[in-house]
Amino acid sequence: MLTSEKTLDQSETLLKKAIKYVENRGFKNIKTKLDGYESPNSFAQKKEDNEYTPDITAENARGKFYFEIAQKTDKVNSLVSKWKLLATLAEMKNGGFSILVPYGLNKFTEDLVNNYKIDANLIKMS
């Protein structure tokens, strides 16, 4: 999905901002794809032949939380499946599912969450 160096840099910058957000809210045991962190577990859905890895997982006293950074894609069905899976896992683990929304992607993200009835907390990133 991420092909150009510029896109990789932007993705890493967004991920670093997201980690700061999570850390500032007191979450512990943070896992992400960035160097210096343990990688989060991947999950597979039996009905689909896809494997999904959350952008960030973290824990607090309440439970386990999953965080995704919204990105536009042509593979909407795959994105919706991933978000629904993460929302379900969060509910099972007494946690929550949040989508961090970069500037310019609010409508795209809101439409997906509303149209597909995804239980997610949308957080605007500046």
Image: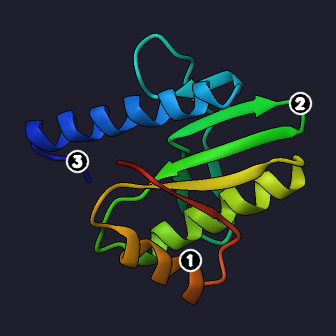
Q: For numbered disc 2, what is the local secondary structure?
A: loop
Seen from this angle, which residue lies furthest top?
36
Q: Residue furthest bottom?
A: 115
Hey, what amino acid is under mark 3?
A: Leu
Between tags 1 and 3, which lies in front?
A: 1
Mark carried by residue 113: 1
Residue labelled with disc 3 = 2
Q: Secondary structure at mark 1?
A: helix
Q: CA distance from mark 2 to mark 3?
A: 34 Å
The reply to whether discs 2 and 3 touch (Cβ–Cβ < 8 Å) is: no
Q: Give the residue number, with chain letter if any, for mark 2.
A: 61
- Point 75% across, 52% down: residue: 96
| Contact flag, marks 2 and 1 (Cβ < 8 Å) | no
Rendering coords of residue 66 (x, y %): 65, 45
Residue 9 pos. (x, y %): 19, 33
Residue 90 in the image, given as x and y percentages of width and height? 78, 52
Among the 4 quarters of the image, the one containing residue 6? top left
Asked which quadrant contains residue 54, the reply is: top right
Which of pointers 1 and 3 lies earlier in the amino acid sequence? 3
Q: Residue at x 89, y 30 (%)?
A: 61
Between 109 and 93, the one lying in front of the other is 109
Tell me the mark number nearer the camera, choosing from 2 and 3: 2
Q: Amino acid at mark 2?
A: Ala
* N-term mark: 2 or 3: 3
Give the residue type that dot 1 points to. Val
Q: Earlier in the sequence, mark 2 or mark 1?
A: 2
Question: Would residue 8 appear left or right of 95 to someone viewing this image?
Answer: left
